[in-house]
Image: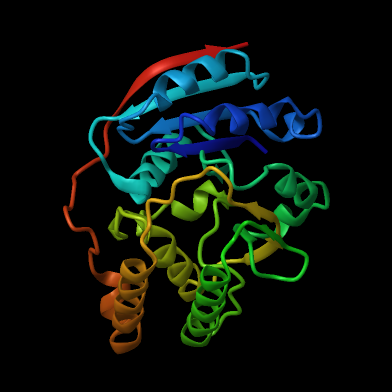
C-alpha cells in the first residue's frame, strides 16, 4: 500500500511545523510513503514555515506545492487527488495543516487492518471514543444535529461530515465524480453525501480533536445556511444534485507549482 499524506495549508504558519513534527513518531513512518503539502496562496509565512519543517521531516519523499490560484479547500483536495492518481498511490490521507488532529489516531486503525475493506476511512469527532478539547458547546451541538439530519437523508449513519483526518482509496475517484463538488469549505459535505449515495465502503474511527491557537476560516452561521442549502437540493432532486456542477467558478484544471521536493 503506497500512502500519500496530503496536508492542505492556508495561513497556518504557526501550526504547520507542529503538524510535520508528527511524522517523527516511529509508529507513523511505516504507513507513510510521501508527504504532500499544498499551500493555497497563504498570505502569512506558511510557505516558508512548511519548507523549513519539511527539510527535517523523516518521510522518504516530501513535496511542497503552491496552487496557481486560490482554489479553496475543496480545490486543494482536487489537486491532491490528481497528484495521487498521476503518481500511482493507492491511498490518500488528508491531514489538515492547522494541527487540530493527530495522524497517530489513524495509525491505530491501520494497524488493525481497517483499511483492507474500506474505500473511505473517515475520522469522526462526534462518535464514541472521540475526544474534543477546546471545542465550543455550540459548535458541538450544531455538528451533532447536522450529522443526524445528513444521516436521515443519506440513509447511512454518518458520525462526522468532514473532519481534518481521513483516508481514501485513490481508485475510488477514477471516474472523477468529485470534480463537480464545490471548491470551498463545503467540499466534504458533497463528498460524504456522494460516498453514501454510491454505496462506497465507508467506515468511521474516533479521534482526538483540539482547538487552541487555530484560526477558523468558517463562519458558523454562514456555513449553516450553506449546508442547509446543499442538503435541500439533495432532498428535492437527488439525480440533479449528483449530476450538477456545484462550483462557483468551474475550471478546466487546477494547476499548481512545485516549490520544493526532497527524496531519500
Which quarter of the picture shows residue 126?
A: bottom right
In the rendered image, residue 178, in percent from the top left (x then y), is placed at 37, 57
Name the residue rendered at 72%, 35% in the picture.
Answer: 31
Name the residue rendered at 35%, 79% in the picture.
Answer: 228
When the figure is inspected, residue 80 is found, relative to residue 144, above or below; the finding is above
When the figure is inspected, residue 182 is found, relative to residue 126, above or below; the finding is above
Which quarter of the picture shows residue 121?
A: bottom right
Quadrant holding the N terminus: top right
Name the residue rendered at 56%, 65% in the picture.
Answer: 136
When the figure is inspected, residue 104 is found, relative to residue 179, above or below; the finding is above
Q: Nearer the viewer, residue 106 or 4?
A: 106
When the figure is inspected, residue 91 is found, relative to residue 50, above or below; the finding is below
Q: Nearer the viewer, residue 61 or 22?
A: 22
Q: Is residue 141 left or right of residue 45?
A: right
In the rendered image, residue 67, in percent from the top left (x then y), is placed at 30, 32
Q: Nearer the viewer, residue 108 or 50?
A: 50
In the rendered image, residue 182, in percent from the top left (x then y), is placed at 29, 59
Quadrant holding the C terminus: top right
In the rendered image, residue 220, in percent from the top left (x then y), is placed at 39, 66
In this rendering, the count of numbered labels is 0
Q: Is residue 35 left or right of residue 8?
A: right
**Image color mode:** rainbow
Name the residue rendered at 57%, 35% in the picture.
Answer: 4
Which quarter of the picture shows residue 32?
A: top right
Amino acid at each position: 500500500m503506497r500512502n500519500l499524506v496530503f496536508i492542505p495549508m492556508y495561513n497556518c504558519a504557526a501550526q504547520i511545523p507542529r503538524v510535520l513534527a508528527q511524522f517523527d513518531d516511529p509508529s507513523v513512518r511505516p504507513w507513510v510513503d510521501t508527504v504532500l503539502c499544498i499551500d493555497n496562496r497563504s498570505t502569512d509565512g506558511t510557505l516558508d514555515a512548511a519548507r523549513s519543517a519539511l527539510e527535517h521531516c523523516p518521510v522518504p519523499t516530501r513535496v511542497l506545492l503552491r496552487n496557481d490560484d486560490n482554489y479553496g479547500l475543496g480545490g486543494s483536495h482536487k489537486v491532491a487527488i490528481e497528484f495521487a492518481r498521476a503518481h500511482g498511490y493507492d491511498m490518500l490521507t488528508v491531514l489538515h495543516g492547522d494541527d487540530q488532529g493527530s495522524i497517530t489516531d489513524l495509525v491505530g486503525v491501520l494497524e488493525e487492518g481497517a483499511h483492507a475493506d474500506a474505500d473511505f476511512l473517515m475520522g469522526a469527532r462526534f462518535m464514541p471514543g472521540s475526544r474534543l478539547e477546546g471545542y465550543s458547546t455550540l459548535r458541538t451541538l450544531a455538528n451533532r444535529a447536522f450529522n443526524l439530519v445528513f444521516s436521515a437523508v443519506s440513509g447511512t449513519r454518518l458520525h462526522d461530515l468532514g473532519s481534518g483526518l481521513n483516508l481514501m482509496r485513490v481508485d475510488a475517484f477514477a471516474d472523477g465524480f468529485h470534480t463537480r463538488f464545490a471548491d470551498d469549505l463545503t467540499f466534504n459535505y458533497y463528498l460524504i453525501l456522494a460516498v453514501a449515495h454510491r454505496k462506497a465502503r465507508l467506515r468511521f474511527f474516533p479521534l482526538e480533536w483540539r482547538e487552541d491557537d487555530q484560526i477558523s476560516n468558517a463562519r458558523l452561521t454562514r456555513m449553516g445556511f450553506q449546508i442547509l442549502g446543499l442538503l435541500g437540493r439533495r432532498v428535492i432532486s437527488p439525480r440533479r444534485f449528483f449530476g450538477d456542477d456545484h462550483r462557483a467558478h468551474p475550471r478546466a484544471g487546477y494547476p499548481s507549482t512545485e516549490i520544493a521536493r526532497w527524496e531519500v
